[in-house]
Image (tube, rainbow, N blue to C red):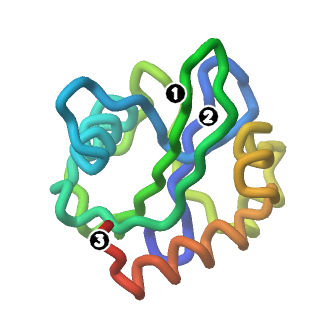
Amino acid sequence: MDGESLLLVEDFRSPGEWKLPSGRMELGESPREGVARELCEEIGLSVDPADLTYFYDESGEPVENQYMVGIDYAVPRAKTTGTLEAGSDATDARFFTPDEFAASECSMKYTHVDRFGTDSLDWLLCKVRDALEAGDRR
């Protein structure tokens, strides 16, 4: 989060569809360590895992005997270092205010709409802001 804007990445598999940066954990990583590694790999930003704040989680139905668990963390832009640039899993990465996103031709990735129940960047921004203010360190 940077002021009133959220960082989104354009999914390389779905041009025009944007999502929160995401990825999979590697064996032996904590969720926070996985998030920090993915941020660096996907968008070039480094963060101390201790600076990440929990804001959302979900689990889905098993697919081919595999369960997916999603855990979302937030961090203020000021707590990151590095140059923002799209990495291997993204074609673009940038901060959007809700008004900028609504005025663009971009859309939220369908999986985010399913996951959060909305395509509203306002809702997501409020969720992240509330979490950062509460400081949940799960």
Q: Return the disc, 3 or 1, that comes first in the chain's sequence.
A: 1
Q: Nearer the viewer, mark 3 or mark 1?
A: 3
- Compared with 64, 21 (above or below) is below
Q: Residues within 10 Å of mark 1 (few under 14, many from 20)?
A: many
The residue most toward the bottom is 133
Q: Quadrant of residue 135?
A: bottom left
Q: Return the disc, 1 or 2, that comes first in the chain's sequence.
A: 2
Q: Residues within 10 Å of mark 2 (few under 14, many from 20)?
A: many
Q: What is the three-letter code of the residue carrying label 2? A: Glu
Q: Which mark is residue 137?
A: 3
Residue at left offset 71%, top offset 45%: 112
Q: CA distance from mark 3 to mark 1?
A: 27 Å
Q: Badge 2 is on which residue?
A: 10
The residue most toward the front is 65
Q: Badge 1 is on which residue?
A: 90
Residue at left offset 39%, top offset 32%: 42
As helix, strand or loop, the secondary structure at mark 3 comes to: loop
Q: Considering depth in this image, is 72 or 64 the residue closer to the camera?
A: 64
User: Residue 40's x, y, as percent?
Assistant: 27, 37
Q: Is the C-beta separation of discs 3 and 2 under 8 Å?
A: no
Q: Return the disc, 3 or 2, that comes first in the chain's sequence.
A: 2
Residue 133 in view, yes or no: yes
Q: Considering depth in this image, is 54 or 20 the residue closer to the camera?
A: 54
Give the quadrant of the N terminus: bottom left
As helix, strand or loop, the secondary structure at mark 2 comes to: strand
